[in-house]
Amino acid sequence: MPLLVDVRQLAVINELIKDGASNVASSFGTLAGVETTIDIQSLAFVDPGDLSDEIGAEEVYAATIDLTEPPYGSFMLTFSDDTAAAVAELVAGAPVEGELTSMQESALQEMCNICTSGFIDGFANTLDTTINMGTPALEHTAGQAIVDDQLSHVRDESIAIVLDSTVCVPERNRELELHVYLVPAPGAFVNLLDNIDLDAFEQESMSEIPG
């Protein structure tokens, strides 16, 4: 059975993801001590069975976590080796030469912690709720293995929300590509959307547009 949502709820979903992404940039900027912005390259809804193609076969870094409150499901943040090296250098303050040092690996884990919680908090704030979470597990492996290990339990009627974004660090002339995958439990996700006052949401969104 496909996931059914009201057409107007698509705007809500779009706003949820954008607010989460904005929090990612803010959280990373605070961690690295630099000004950051985020540029959303694309936002798409895909079948969970297609996530292997979305992530690709190459090795990536992936921070994954299961959500223990609505919308439940799984959250995953992935990024390339080049982005990992740039993040490690920005946060740890030392250039990457070959393998990551223990300090740089810790910086990478901390980035994943703060960006994951930043996204989920931004998402929850828009819903006027809270979503508790633990510490994301960070691994470096092939994209296919991540999907098999972390998302094998996802049900056929689920939907995956895929966000491709670039965190820009102007003063360091750096652009960090981050990919977000949110696969909510279908029933819980629809229930959250159904409880949103769409008229009030639209009025609030319009009030935020500069006159």
Image (spheres, grey):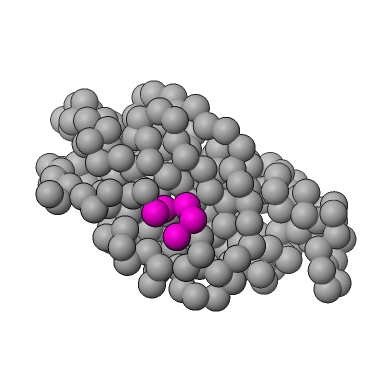
Residue at point 40%, 68% (across, down): 52
Q: Is residue 33 above or below residue 43?
A: above
Q: Quadrant of the C terminus?
A: top left
In the drawing, does residue 167 fall left or right of residue 107? left
Q: Nearer the viewer, residue 41 or 102?
A: 102
Residue at point 59%, 71% (across, down): 59
Q: Is residue 53 visible?
A: yes
Q: Give yes or no for residue 148 being in the magenta stretch.
A: yes
In the drawing, does residue 51 fall left or right of residue 6? right
Quadrant in the rendering for residue 163: bottom left
Q: Which residues are magenta?
A: 147-152
Q: Is residue 154 above or below residue 198?
A: below
The prevailing secondary structure element of the residues shown in magenta is helix
Residue 75 position, x and y percent, is 45, 46
Residue 159 position, x and y percent, is 27, 52
Quadrant in the rendering for residue 140: bottom right
Residue 115 position, x and y percent, is 58, 45
Q: Is residue 43 above or below residue 127?
A: below
Q: Is residue 200 visible?
A: no
In the drawing, does residue 103 fall left or right of residue 23? right
* Total numbered labels: 0
Residue at point 24%, 53% (across, down): 156
In the drawing, does residue 191 fall left or right of residue 28? left
Residue 161 position, x and y percent, is 34, 53
Q: Give yes or no for residue 37 being in the magenta stretch.
A: no
Residue at point 21%, 26% (across, down): 195
Q: Nearer the viewer, residue 14 or 45?
A: 45
